[in-house]
Image (tube, coloured by chain):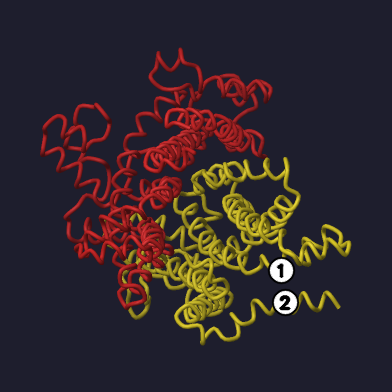
Amino acid sequence: MSKAKIKQSTLGRLMPGLTSLTKRGPSGWMVILGIIIVSALVIMTVIAHWIAPHDPIEIGVGPIRAPPSSQFPMGTNHLGQDVLSRILCGGSVMLQVSILSVLVCFVVGVPLGLFSSYVGGLFDRACSLVIDAIYAFPGLVIAIAIFAMLGPGVVNMALSIAVVYIPSYFRVVRSQVLSIKELTYVEAARGIGARWHTILFRYVFPNVIPSIVVIATINFADAVLTAAGLTFIGLGVSVDIPDWGWDLKYGRELLSSGAWWVITFPGLMIILLALGFTLIGEGLSEVLNPKLQR
Amino acid sequence: MGLRSYIITRILLTIPTLLLLLSMVFLVMRVLPGDPVELHFEKKATPEQMEAMRRALGLDKPLWAQYTDYLWGLVDVGYLLEHGYPNLGKSMQTFEEVGGQIFSAFPATLELAIYSMLIASIIGILLGVTSSKSYNSFLDHLIRGFGTVTYAVPIFVLGMIFQLIFGVYLRWLPTGLRLDPAVNPPPTITGLYTIDSLIAANPVKFFEASKALLLPSLTLGLILSGMFIRMTRTNMLETLRLDFVTAAKARGLKESTVTYGYALRNAFLPILTMMGLQFAILLGGAILTETTFSWPGLGRYTVDRITFRDYTAIQGAVVMFGLFVTLVSLIVDILYAYFDPRIRL
């Protein structure tokens, strides 16, 4: 019985936000717009290989550095590759990395934050000290150092980005649990003899979900930008996989020739993907939790 | 607690934070899977060559000895006085002192950081105040929309678009480097070209240095301004509701005096703290900005060293970034205590 009730309360908190987004004014529309952008890009990436007019990694399908034309709507790059095909296929690494890094952050950061603040004492202080030190450090520098040591690969890139964002989850969860664990209903649960993990995961956790959802969507946007940044400085996954970050890295070398199409289109795609996630995050933070609207 | 004892306590509290930070860097560079020497040679060298490299750099010693060497290098005052920079070990690529290379690259990053921060603060505070004054109007939504977009734009994309427009098409501004190679840098005093050229009373060099600085700092400043807009707006919205603002208005003071002289002054402290926190983000952004504009700073140095797989140099650069951030947060905290005596209680 209690399980069903908790489920209802969790959904109950999320549902008003998700079902009646249109009635929530500008914030609701922000979320809807964000969801549309992100799903469109995900669908595009999934079906890219069927709809791309050319093989995205085949060299010399057209002339070198040709401006957009009817044959190559987004032009060609310095290797004579079709930019349109590369744009269609170029999101896959970024999407995989961001999904994986958000998952890792969630799996590590949330339980750590829940446990640390609930247990308190020395463990909590030690955790907070380490997490604060990571939090204060330039994120991109950490990601660069870790990724450079781990070596290329989607999983390694996701891990090095996750290390940067675990502190955000930890801090948000921790500060929320600190206030929630003092509430009467938690005390009541303790009073009827509920075990600690029951209290933590069935009573406290559901109340933290809205904040985690907001952090996760913002984390998605940051992960996309960080993945693009890592690739741009030359730490990408593989040159053989079409990627907007690589296109920008090589496009930079063509800048002086004035080939705007080589950087503008991949740049816009990254902006669009990050903007989609940012819109969802910003909108949700207002829809789900008015207190977070800072 | 007096200001002096607060400052001393704050400095003492920095030591464990620093130790933790240095240990984490060491942990990442030495304990994570991946041997720096093997990574450097990409498995193309003989075991003897790799062994020679390990011995030359002290990487053949046990981990704890490497750790104490590494920490000792940072506090070795004798070395510092002799060379003018701390001992950060030798580069795997050139076998030169990493400390020296980093300290010659550092002023470029500092100059970029200062001007970007300035641009971000001016844009952020002006737009943030405007946004809070016209709460929930079209202008407010427009400014907030601008802020949201800055979160989503990668720094290097904005930088390259600026380079295309102002450098390649209009040819108004240089697309890279701190000075035109034809111009000699001003005599080094601070290492910041704009300041040094002013000290040397050389307006031509000042103009050249500012021209080169404009696009990189505008790029980084614009990207950061979004967060500053949000912070200013939130704090101003809270302050504008307070009684003393209403009282000032009732006394018939000018609108701008009430906004900037009364409200912003009081909303400024939390904004200052937030700015200190943004500094780490600014440095991360500086790496990408420097790469985009071939700006010869610490970020560019780090990225170059990555290409050469020069792990000792990367470790030194990461340490330097960490020290820089710690120092700035120390300064911000002391400033805060100076402006707001309540913090010292």
In the rendered image of the structure, the colour used to display chain B is red
Q: Position of residue A262 (x, y in %)?
A: 36, 64
Q: Are marks 2 and 1 on the same chain?
A: yes
Quadrant for residue B333, please give it. top left
Amino acid at the residue labelled 2: Ser
Q: Position of residue B157 (x, y in %)?
A: 37, 60
Is residue A77 at least partly visible in the picture? no
Among numbered discs 2 and 1, the one appearing first in the sequence: 2
Question: Are dots 2 and 1 in contact, CB under 8 Å?
Answer: yes
Q: Position of residue B285 (x, y in %)?
A: 41, 50
Subunit that carries the residue with mark 1: A
Amino acid at the residue labelled 1: Pro
Furthest residue toward right: A193
Subunit that carries the residue with mark 2: A
- SS category of the residue bearing label 1: helix
Give the chain coloured yellow. Answer: A
Q: Residue B196 vs residue A143: left or right? A: left
Q: Residue B98 vs residue A162: left or right? A: left
Q: Where is B91 relative to A269, above or below?
A: above
Label of residue A206 in the image? 1
- SS category of the residue bearing label 2: helix
User: Which residue is painted at 16% across and 36% down in the image?
Assistant: B183
Is residue A230 at least partly visible in the picture? yes
Of B151 and A243, which appears nearest the observer? B151
Return the residue at label 2: A9
